[in-house]
Image: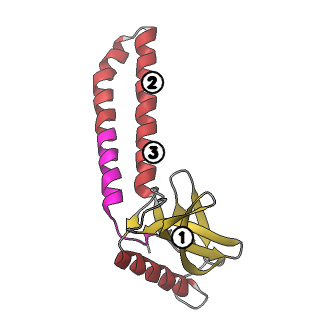
C-alpha cells in the first residue's frame, strides 16, 4: 500500500482548492520571473521590502491552499491520519476501537451535518469528513462534504481497513 491513501473520494472541495493552488503557483512563478532580473541588478530598500511582502503573501497563500486541499481521512500501514487545516493527527491502528457517526461540532455546539468520529482508547476524535445535509443551522465548512452514498462508502472503507489492520488481518501494524 502507498504510504497514505485517501479513504473518501475526491470531490468539489479538493477541485476548488486545487484551483487555488494552481492560481497561487502561477502567481508565484510570475513573481519570480518578473522580480528575478531586478533583484540581480540590485534594488532599493522600498522595492526589497515590497518583494519580501509579496513572497511572504504567496508563501502563506500556497501553504493554506495546499492544507485546505489535503483535508481529509487517510489510511496507511501505521494507522489513520486525520488531516485538518491547521494540524494532522495520527491514530495508530492499535489505538483505534471503531467508528461512529455523530453531529459535527464547532466548539461545544453541534452542527446540522453528521461527521465520522474515530473512537480510540483516549476518547473520540472528529474526522473532517461530513455528510451533506439540507437542514438549516450551524455548518462546519472546513473539510469535504460528501453525499449520503459517498459518506456511507467512506465509513464502510474505514471499517474494512480497521478490520484488516487487526492482528492476523493482513496489514502489518508497526
Q: Which residue is mark 2?
A: 53
Q: Position of residue 112 (x, y in %)?
A: 48, 66
Q: Which dot marks residue 64?
A: 3
Q: Is residue 4 visible?
A: no
Range shown magenta: 2-24
Looking at the image, residue 8 sits to the left or right of residue 117; the answer is left
Secondary-structure class at tag 2: helix
* Left or right, residue 135 beside residue 104: left
Q: Which numbered tag is attached to residue 103?
A: 1
In which quadrant of the rendered image does the C terminus lie? bottom right
Which residue is at 37% across, 17% downward?
39
Q: Residues within 10 Å of mark 2 (few under 14, many from 20)?
A: few
Separation of residues labelled 2 and 3 (CA atoms): 17 Å
The image quarter containing residue 136 is bottom left
Q: Is residue 146 left or right of residue 90?
A: left
Q: Secondary structure at mark 1?
A: strand
| Marks 1 and 2, the one that precedes in the sequence | 2
Residue 21 visible in image: yes
Q: Tag 3's secondary structure? A: helix
Q: Dot 1: within a 10 Å radius of its alpha carbon, few (fewer than 14), some, or many (20 or more) residues? A: some
At x 59%, y 65%, the residue is: 90
Residue 113 placement (x, y as % from top left): 47, 67
Residue 84 in the image: above or below residue 77? above
47 versus 129 height, above or below: above
Amino acid at each position: 500500500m502507498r504510504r497514505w491513501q485517501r479513504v473518501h473520494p475526491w470531490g468539489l472541495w479538493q477541485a476548488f482548492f486545487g484551483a487555488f493552488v494552481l492560481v497561487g503557483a502561477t502567481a508565484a512563478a510570475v513573481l519570480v520571473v518578473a522580480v528575478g532580473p531586478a533583484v540581480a541588478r540590485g534594488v532599493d530598500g522600498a522595492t526589497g521590502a515590497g518583494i519580501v511582502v509579496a513572497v511572504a503573501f504567496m508563501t502563506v497563500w500556497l501553504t493554506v491552499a495546499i492544507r485546505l486541499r489535503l483535508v481529509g481521512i487517510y489510511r496507511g500501514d501505521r494507522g489513520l491520519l486525520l488531516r485538518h487545516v491547521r494540524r494532522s493527527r495520527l491514530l495508530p491502528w492499535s489505538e483505534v476501537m471503531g467508528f461512529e457517526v455523530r453531529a459535527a461540532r464547532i466548539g461545544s455546539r453541534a452542527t446540522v451535518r453528521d461527521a465520522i468520529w474515530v473512537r480510540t482508547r483516549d476518547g473520540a476524535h472528529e474526522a473532517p469528513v461530513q455528510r451533506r445535509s439540507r437542514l438549516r443551522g450551524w455548518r462546519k465548512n472546513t473539510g469535504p462534504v460528501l453525499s449520503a452514498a459517498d459518506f456511507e462508502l467512506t465509513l464502510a472503507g474505514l471499517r474494512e481497513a480497521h478490520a484488516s489492520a487487526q492482528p492476523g488481518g493482513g496489514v502489518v501494524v508497526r
